[in-house]
Image (cartoon, rainbow, N blue to C red):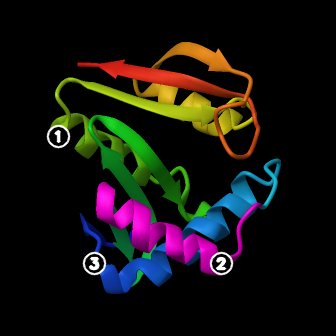
Amino acid sequence: MQTLEIRAARFDELPEVARMYRYSRDRCLSFLPRLHTPEEDLWFFQNIVFKSNELTIVMGDEQIIGMMAIKDDWIEQLYLDPRHLRKGIGTKLLDQAKAQSSGTLKLMCFVENVDARAFYEAHGFKEVKRTSGSENEEGAPDILYEWQA
């Protein structure tokens, strides 16, 4: 079993974060349109995510295999390298988010992302409402989930 390190991301690690994010989205969310280039992904992490969220990474075998961005009790991003799914890494990230929260966490999950929905529901998140997708750039129906301590 590999040793994991969970810690705050550094700015110089954002290119690797953006690559892992794209790799994960391409494999796990292939139903979504690909709206951005790798360069735009990097710009997003450098100028939006890193500046306005608490960005946590998971290091395994000296590479980034997971990331989570939180802002004001909202999980804005949670992505794992698909080769590292179902190993407890997402649970560790969620546990950290819960411990640091005010007692409530919210997140949006695409309706079609059945595996992620099952994961969040297994960790105590409840469906609050569904949207048509008109409020996300992908235009894909999604679900607002909420967890209460």
Q: Going by the image, does 10 lie left or right of 28?
A: left
Look at the numbered disc 1 and give the secondary structure of its residue. helix
Q: Check disc 3 and report its element: helix, strand or loop.
A: loop
3D distance between C-alphas at marks 3 and 2: 19 Å
Q: Which residues are magenta?
A: 35-54
Would you call the spot at circle 2 few (<14 residues within 10 Å), some (14-19), or many (20 or more)?
few
Query: Which residue is pictured at 53% across the width and 23% down the height?
Result: 144
- The amino acid at mark 3 is Arg
Q: From the top left corner, tell me how far across and down residue 14 is, in percent.
A: 42, 78
Kindly identify which residue carries mark 3. Answer: 10
Cα distance in 3D space between marks 3 and 1: 20 Å
Residue behind mark 1: 100
Q: Earlier in the sequence, mark 3 or mark 1?
A: 3
Q: Nearer the viewer, residue 96 or 42?
A: 42
Dot 3 or dot 2, earlier in sequence: 3
Q: Amino acid at mark 1?
A: Gln
Residue 132 quadrant: top right
Q: Is residue 43 magenta?
A: yes
Please state the horizontal and vertical placement of residue 12, each as a whole percent of the image: 34, 86
